[in-house]
Image (cartoon, helix red, strand yellow):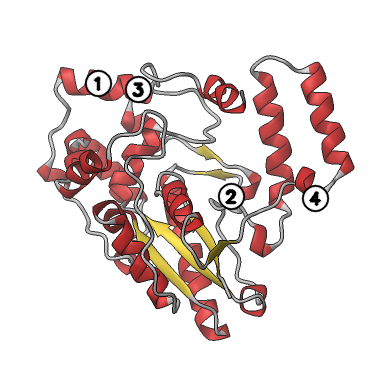
Amino acid sequence: MDLNIKLFGERNTATRAVKQMLRATDGVTLVNSKRPDELGNVEWANLVASINLYIQDDWRKVYMDALRDNVSHYNAPLAMWKHAAPNWDDAFVDQNVCTIFCVRNPYSWALSMACKPYHMKARRTGDFLTFIKRPWLTERRDNTGIILRSVMDLWNEKLRAYAEFSDQAELSGGKTAYVRFEDFVENPASTLANTLADFGVATAPKPIPKSTKNHGKPLSELQSFYANEQWRNRLTAPAVNAINDLLDWPLVDQFCYQRLDAHDFPQRLTATAQDAFSHEMLNLNRKPEIQLCQTARA
């Protein structure tokens, strides 16, 4: 009998790569959410047809996102969005579903979110400090507060939900495991093999050769980048102080991540480094997301 797995993880924590590897692993079945059109929902199909008929420009993506978001918000626990703050339910035990949570160093994660701010409902900014300090408007399917004081509260609330879910699972006989982004990048196959072994499945998933994101970097390049923590080169003392002020430190300690000292970082980046970072944050070297979506559908 296949091992049933439900995967959760905040944006930019390698959930896409983990899912891709698990899907290709014999003896493993991923429990995913089902869109209403896949279930033969006539109302959903009619709304999609109407949107396609009357809205042809970039607003189409806004409408489709809102439609998916509204439906996903009401999904049963086993079908919750992979980026949601999950709620424990006995269905995980009743249907023999094991749960994996993808987690990542909060500083590294914040830098990735600044460049790939999926589902951000605000204008892009080229200033990292502004990105950290301004409020974040969530999706309904995030299953958090509607407006958070900062993007860092996405990290806080999701990991807090994972910890509470794991506690409830342990009390109820459920099985959970954490996949740390840093461990996964260093050795994807070994990390997932160890996780599956904890669930009682002896198998070795095949690694993927490069990042699953657009213009994906080779795995060897990513491994070198994160092994040497080169992401630190984009941090400044003001940014580290801001992140430190926003993090839930008992939670950070629980997940064994270390607090950075602002005194170890410059007050500002060099002009060249800042220009490169701002350029990436403003998405000037990538196709617009709407164009990428249209290309994927073609």
Characterize the local packing of mark 4: few (<14), some (14-19) or many (20 or more) Cα atoms within 10 angstroms. few
For the image shown, how many numbered marks are present on the structure? 4
- Report, in whole angstroms, how far the alpha carbon at label 3 lies from the one at label 4: 42 Å
User: Where residue 112 sits: x, y (%)?
Assistant: 35, 38
Mark seen at residue 142:
2
Quadrant assignment for the C terminus = top right
Task: Return the disc, 4 or 2, that comes first in the chain's sequence.
Answer: 4
Q: Which residue is mark 1?
A: 276
For disc 3, the marked residue is 126
Q: CA distance from mark 1 to mark 2?
A: 31 Å
Closest to the camera, between mark 3 and mark 4, is 4
Name the residue that disc number 4 marks: 39
Earlier in the chain: of badge 3 and badge 2, it is 3
Left or right of residue 41, residue 218 in this image: left
SS under mark 4: helix
Which mark is first along the chain, 3 or 1?
A: 3
- Examine the image and state in which quarter residue 275 appears: top left
Pinpoint residue 288: horizontal percent, then vertical percent.
Answer: 49, 19
Please report contact status of discs 1 and 2: CB closer than 8 Å, yes or no: no
The percent position of residue 281, horizontal first and vertical second, equals: 36, 25
Q: Residue at x 38, y 60 (%)?
A: 205
Up/down of 217 relative to 101, above or below: above
Describe the element under mark 1 as helix, strand or loop. helix
Kind of residue indicated by mark 4: Leu
| Residue appearing at x 61%, y 61% in the figure | 31
Q: In the current view of this chain or complex, which residue is farthest to the front?
A: 26
3D distance between C-alphas at marks 1 and 3: 10 Å
Q: Amino acid at mark 3?
A: Gly
Q: Residue at x 44, y 79 (%)?
A: 200
Kindly check if marks 4 and 2 are in contact, taking CB atoms under 8 A apart as contact.
Answer: no
